[in-house]
Image (tube, rainbow, N blue to C red):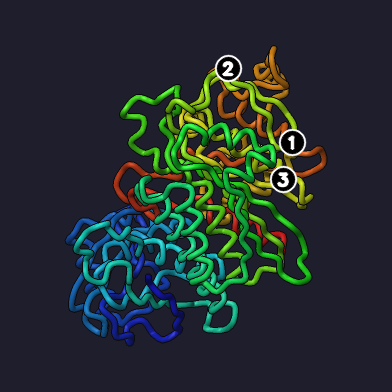
Amino acid sequence: MPTLTVTTRPLADLAADCVVLGATRGEDGAVLAAEAALPTAARAHLEAALADADAKGAIGEVHRVVAVPGVKATSVVVTGLGPDVTPEALRHGAANALRALSAKKHVVVGLPTPDRATLSAVADGAYAGCYGFTKISRQPAAGAGQGPKVTVHSQLGGGKVAKDAVARAEVLGRARDWARDLVNTPPNLLVPSMFEGNVKARIKASGAKVGISVLDEKALAKGGFGGIVGVGQGSANPPRIVTMSWKPAGAKASIALVGKGITFDSGGLCIKPAAGMATMKSDMAGAAAVAAAVLAAAELGLPVAVTGYLCLAENMPSGTAQRPSDVVTMRNGSTVEILDTDAEGRMVLADGIALAAEKKPDAIVDIATLTGAQMIALGDLIAGVMANDDSFRDRVVMAATGACEPAWPMPLPEELRKGLDSTVADIAHKADRWGGMLTAGIFLSTFVPEGTPWAHIDIAGPSFNEKGARGVDPKGGTGYGVGTLLTLVEQYS
């Protein structure tokens, strides 16, 4: 994995495989960022090279120039930042550059970093761009997973503020890469019990003081977790709820994070078409984000108690599988009529939310690849955020914005609640197709005790990138949500 350090030495004097600089989009093409302090000859050489390449300075452009006069580094890479030097542009620009330099041993990143927000964004993007999933092969690639040494040039200085920002970026990046690895792991290698084992191994390797407890299929049945038991009963791989706990002395607040962890979603008896299963190994991205965020909070020593509930199950068809029209009793005693076994995520989440509520946390946030309706409404880059409290919803959206993870506030209209009425149970778990993202949120809200702030983040789109790498997002699992959850916890500290 990559390492991040910080320096204030002049960029031209740093011996490295490459120095990364930024360029904005000007009227006549790419313009080197003014913050790049370089010898006159070096700047003139780079400007001529960019003009010759017809560079525009757009985000996604990466131009490499070798043997730049007056620069000790072997080469200079100029990454596009778009028209405005924003933290988000810096984050994506740094990631694009590092992705193009994955084979290098030492890279210096010299993008504009006048304050903590920009320094954090550059460091975060640089780490994110180094990611690559280690292929499962009889002959793994040499050096797979090692990553380069990345030195971030700080215009903010080399004091505690700068060092803390870069150190946080490394912790966040390491956690997010773990979440990406979990999402990208083939489903036969990450059934619920294997997910549990992976979490235990990661905590042990980290050395962080994170407690862990597990409810297996017997404990779940005995404890009245009818939602997750019903979803998992069709699989030979039984369900789990794994609880991760970071409990610092003198904690200023307590936050519960609940993640959907469907390690593979066939749709159950309401089976998906073949093409619809192609990415269903990623249906546990919410649980991956929660696990990574809890570990990152512990590694950073945040003075907030954080408990993560990983609701793990495999949704499969078989002779023991749950049927449409079944009625199950949930952890909180509510009865639910099952209408569609392919709407399973809300059932495992509801049990997880009910369990989290029993500890009376200051707030509950669940995160899930929950509905196709989210992608229809917001596309594959923006998450939908719903809540039982508008101010708390806005706080979660603000955390997402601060983490450069796009999110949009969505309503939970009371008039849609009647679509969940059931003639045989307390509530049906699904309404009609219209407003499906919202009615899923309304269903979950019924498991939250009155007075407890709660938010639901639907990440069906941004959790998995089926296209080519773009900015901080590699192809495959993106790790979306880790930054949002960690930033939200930090707000409470």
How would you rate the neighbour count of disc 3 (Cα within 10 Å): few for under 14, some for 14-19, many for 20 or more? some
Disc 2 residue type (three-letter): Ser
Q: Name the element at disc 2.
A: loop
The quadrant of the image that shows the C terminus is: bottom right
Question: Where 275 sits versus 193, above or below?
Answer: above
Measure the alpha-carbon separation of dots 1 and 3. Answer: 23 Å
Disc 1 residue type (three-letter): Asn
Measure the alpha-carbon separation of dots 2 and 1. Answer: 20 Å
- The residue at 46%/59% (across/down) is 198
Residue behind mark 2: 325
Q: Which of marks 2 and 3 is nearer the N terminus?
A: 2
Residue 342 at x, y percent in the picture:
48, 27
How would you rate the neighbour count of disc 2 (Cα within 10 Å): few for under 14, some for 14-19, many for 20 or more? some
Q: Earlier in the sequence, mark 2 or mark 1?
A: 2
Residue 148 at x, y percent in the picture:
32, 74
- The residue at 64%/33% (across/down) is 226
Q: Does residue 322 appear left or right of residue 236 in this picture?
A: right
Q: Does residue 14 appear left or right of residue 431 in this picture?
A: left
Question: Where 129 sits versus 192, above or below?
Answer: below
**Residue 21 picture quarter:** bottom left
In this rendering, the label closer to the viewer, 1 or 3 = 1
Q: Name the element at disc 3.
A: helix
Q: Name the element at disc 1.
A: loop
Residue behind mark 3: 392
Residue behind mark 1: 332
Question: Does residue 380 appear in this view?
Answer: no
In this rendering, the label closer to the viewer, 2 or 3 = 2
Query: Viewer-proximal residue, 441 or 241?
Result: 241
- The residue at 31%/28% (across/down) is 274
Disc 3 residue type (three-letter): Phe
